[in-house]
Image (cartoon, rainbow, N blue to C red):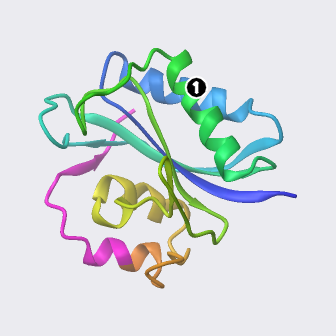
Amino acid sequence: MSHQAYIGIGSNLGKKKENYLEALERIAKLPGTRITKESSLYESEPLGESKERYVNGAIEIETELGPEALLNKLKNIERAMGRKKVRKRWGARIIDLDILLFDNLKLEKRNLMIPHSEMHKRKFVLIPLSEIAPQLVHPVLGVTISELLVSVKDDKKVSLMRS
Protein backbone atom coordinates (compact mmCIF):
# COMPACT_ATOMS: atom_id res chain seq x y z
CA MET A 1 0.00 0.00 0.00
CA SER A 2 1.31 3.42 -0.94
CA HIS A 3 1.41 6.33 1.50
CA GLN A 4 1.85 10.05 0.91
CA ALA A 5 4.25 11.83 3.24
CA TYR A 6 5.79 15.26 3.49
CA ILE A 7 9.34 15.68 4.76
CA GLY A 8 11.04 18.85 5.91
CA ILE A 9 14.75 19.06 5.12
CA GLY A 10 17.30 21.42 6.64
CA SER A 11 21.05 21.90 6.89
CA ASN A 12 23.18 24.58 8.55
CA LEU A 13 26.65 23.02 8.68
CA GLY A 14 29.26 22.60 5.97
CA LYS A 15 28.16 22.77 2.34
CA LYS A 16 24.50 23.24 3.16
CA LYS A 17 23.04 23.15 -0.35
CA GLU A 18 25.10 20.06 -1.23
CA ASN A 19 23.97 18.38 2.01
CA TYR A 20 20.36 19.10 1.11
CA LEU A 21 20.75 17.68 -2.41
CA GLU A 22 22.56 14.59 -1.10
CA ALA A 23 19.68 13.96 1.32
CA LEU A 24 17.24 14.16 -1.62
CA GLU A 25 19.27 11.58 -3.54
CA ARG A 26 19.35 9.24 -0.55
CA ILE A 27 15.60 9.58 0.10
CA ALA A 28 14.89 8.84 -3.57
CA LYS A 29 16.80 5.55 -3.19
CA LEU A 30 14.73 4.28 -0.25
CA PRO A 31 12.89 1.04 -1.08
CA GLY A 32 9.37 1.57 -2.44
CA THR A 33 9.77 5.34 -2.24
CA ARG A 34 9.75 8.10 -4.82
CA ILE A 35 9.85 11.89 -4.56
CA THR A 36 6.75 13.34 -6.23
CA LYS A 37 7.21 17.07 -5.47
CA GLU A 38 10.12 19.26 -4.39
CA SER A 39 9.98 22.81 -3.08
CA SER A 40 12.47 25.50 -3.93
CA LEU A 41 15.38 25.94 -1.55
CA TYR A 42 15.06 28.61 1.13
CA GLU A 43 17.51 30.25 3.46
CA SER A 44 16.31 30.90 7.00
CA GLU A 45 17.53 32.44 10.21
CA PRO A 46 18.53 29.86 12.82
CA LEU A 47 16.53 29.04 15.94
CA GLY A 48 18.17 28.96 19.36
CA GLU A 49 21.90 29.51 19.83
CA SER A 50 23.05 28.40 16.39
CA LYS A 51 24.58 31.21 14.34
CA GLU A 52 24.59 29.61 10.90
CA ARG A 53 21.65 30.21 8.57
CA TYR A 54 19.79 27.15 7.35
CA VAL A 55 19.01 25.85 3.90
CA ASN A 56 15.44 24.51 4.12
CA GLY A 57 12.87 22.91 1.87
CA ALA A 58 10.17 20.29 1.75
CA ILE A 59 9.32 17.30 -0.39
CA GLU A 60 6.32 15.13 -1.03
CA ILE A 61 6.97 11.42 -1.33
CA GLU A 62 5.02 8.30 -2.11
CA THR A 63 6.27 5.39 -0.05
CA GLU A 64 5.38 1.83 0.83
CA LEU A 65 7.12 2.32 4.18
CA GLY A 66 5.03 2.84 7.31
CA PRO A 67 5.66 5.95 9.45
CA GLU A 68 8.05 4.29 11.91
CA ALA A 69 10.01 2.49 9.18
CA LEU A 70 10.28 5.78 7.29
CA LEU A 71 11.53 7.55 10.43
CA ASN A 72 14.19 4.84 10.92
CA LYS A 73 15.34 5.18 7.30
CA LEU A 74 15.53 8.99 7.63
CA LYS A 75 17.56 8.69 10.86
CA ASN A 76 19.90 6.26 9.06
CA ILE A 77 20.38 8.84 6.28
CA GLU A 78 21.17 11.53 8.86
CA ARG A 79 23.77 9.29 10.54
CA ALA A 80 25.28 8.20 7.21
CA MET A 81 25.69 11.87 6.27
CA GLY A 82 27.58 12.54 9.50
CA ARG A 83 24.91 13.94 11.79
CA LYS A 84 25.94 13.68 15.40
CA LYS A 85 23.56 13.29 18.33
CA VAL A 86 22.41 16.86 19.04
CA ARG A 87 22.46 17.66 22.73
CA LYS A 88 21.00 21.13 22.38
CA ARG A 89 17.56 21.70 20.96
CA TRP A 90 17.89 23.59 17.66
CA GLY A 91 21.63 22.99 17.57
CA ALA A 92 23.65 23.14 14.36
CA ARG A 93 23.29 20.07 12.17
CA ILE A 94 24.65 18.79 8.89
CA ILE A 95 21.21 17.46 7.94
CA ASP A 96 17.79 17.36 9.56
CA LEU A 97 14.99 15.23 8.12
CA ASP A 98 11.54 15.55 9.70
CA ILE A 99 8.32 13.77 8.81
CA LEU A 100 5.85 16.64 8.74
CA LEU A 101 2.72 14.79 7.61
CA PHE A 102 1.97 11.19 6.72
CA ASP A 103 -1.33 10.47 4.93
CA ASN A 104 -4.01 11.90 7.22
CA LEU A 105 -2.41 10.24 10.22
CA LYS A 106 -2.40 11.49 13.80
CA LEU A 107 0.31 9.69 15.76
CA GLU A 108 1.80 10.43 19.18
CA LYS A 109 4.74 8.32 20.24
CA ARG A 110 7.78 9.19 22.27
CA ASN A 111 10.02 9.34 19.20
CA LEU A 112 7.48 10.30 16.51
CA MET A 113 4.70 12.88 16.40
CA ILE A 114 2.62 13.17 13.23
CA PRO A 115 1.75 15.84 12.27
CA HIS A 116 5.07 17.32 13.36
CA SER A 117 4.33 19.11 16.63
CA GLU A 118 6.06 22.41 15.74
CA MET A 119 5.39 22.71 11.99
CA HIS A 120 2.46 25.12 12.29
CA LYS A 121 4.66 27.58 14.23
CA ARG A 122 7.54 27.77 11.75
CA LYS A 123 7.76 29.82 8.58
CA PHE A 124 10.80 27.84 7.39
CA VAL A 125 8.56 24.75 7.29
CA LEU A 126 5.31 26.35 6.12
CA ILE A 127 6.75 28.39 3.23
CA PRO A 128 8.27 25.44 1.31
CA LEU A 129 5.37 23.17 2.27
CA SER A 130 2.83 25.71 1.03
CA GLU A 131 4.74 25.89 -2.26
CA ILE A 132 4.15 22.17 -2.96
CA ALA A 133 0.89 21.54 -1.04
CA PRO A 134 -0.98 24.79 -0.31
CA GLN A 135 -4.42 23.15 -0.05
CA LEU A 136 -3.29 20.22 2.09
CA VAL A 137 -5.29 20.20 5.32
CA HIS A 138 -3.50 19.80 8.66
CA PRO A 139 -5.19 16.71 10.16
CA VAL A 140 -5.33 18.14 13.70
CA LEU A 141 -5.88 21.86 13.15
CA GLY A 142 -8.31 21.40 10.23
CA VAL A 143 -6.93 24.27 8.15
CA THR A 144 -4.83 24.32 4.98
CA ILE A 145 -1.07 24.82 4.93
CA SER A 146 -1.52 28.18 3.18
CA GLU A 147 -3.95 29.27 5.92
CA LEU A 148 -1.39 28.27 8.56
CA LEU A 149 1.27 30.30 6.75
CA VAL A 150 -0.91 33.42 6.68
CA SER A 151 -1.51 33.24 10.43
CA VAL A 152 1.93 32.09 11.67
CA LYS A 153 3.49 34.32 14.34
CA ASP A 154 7.12 33.57 13.44
CA ASP A 155 9.38 36.62 12.96
CA LYS A 156 12.38 34.68 11.58
CA LYS A 157 13.40 35.73 8.09
CA VAL A 158 13.00 33.12 5.32
CA SER A 159 14.06 33.93 1.76
CA LEU A 160 14.22 32.10 -1.55
CA MET A 161 17.79 30.94 -2.23
CA ARG A 162 19.55 32.27 -5.26
CA SER A 163 21.02 29.47 -7.37
Is residue 155 positioned above or below 67 on the image? Answer: below
Residue 16: image quadrant is: top left
Above or below, 160 against 116 in this view is: above
Q: Secondary structure at mark 1?
A: helix
Residue 6 at what x, y percent from top left? 58, 55
Residue 12: where, in percent of width, then height? Answer: 30, 28
| Residue lying at 45% horizontally and 65% vertically, measured from the top left | 130
Q: Quadrant of the N terminus?
A: bottom right
Q: Is residue 99 visible?
A: yes
Residue 39, above or below 18: below
- Confirm whether the magenta stretch covers residue 142: no
Residue 154: say if magenta: yes
Pointer 1 local density, CA inside 10 Å: few below 14, some 14–19, many at least 20: many
- Residue at 57% x, 70% y is 106
The residue identified by callout 1 is: 77
Q: Nearer the viewer, residue 117 or 23?
A: 117
Residue occupying the point 39% across, 19% down: 84
The quadrant in which the C terminus is found is top left
The residue at 16%/53% (across/down) is 156
Q: Is residue 40 visible?
A: no
The magenta stretch spans which residues?
148-163
Amino acid beneath label 1: Ile
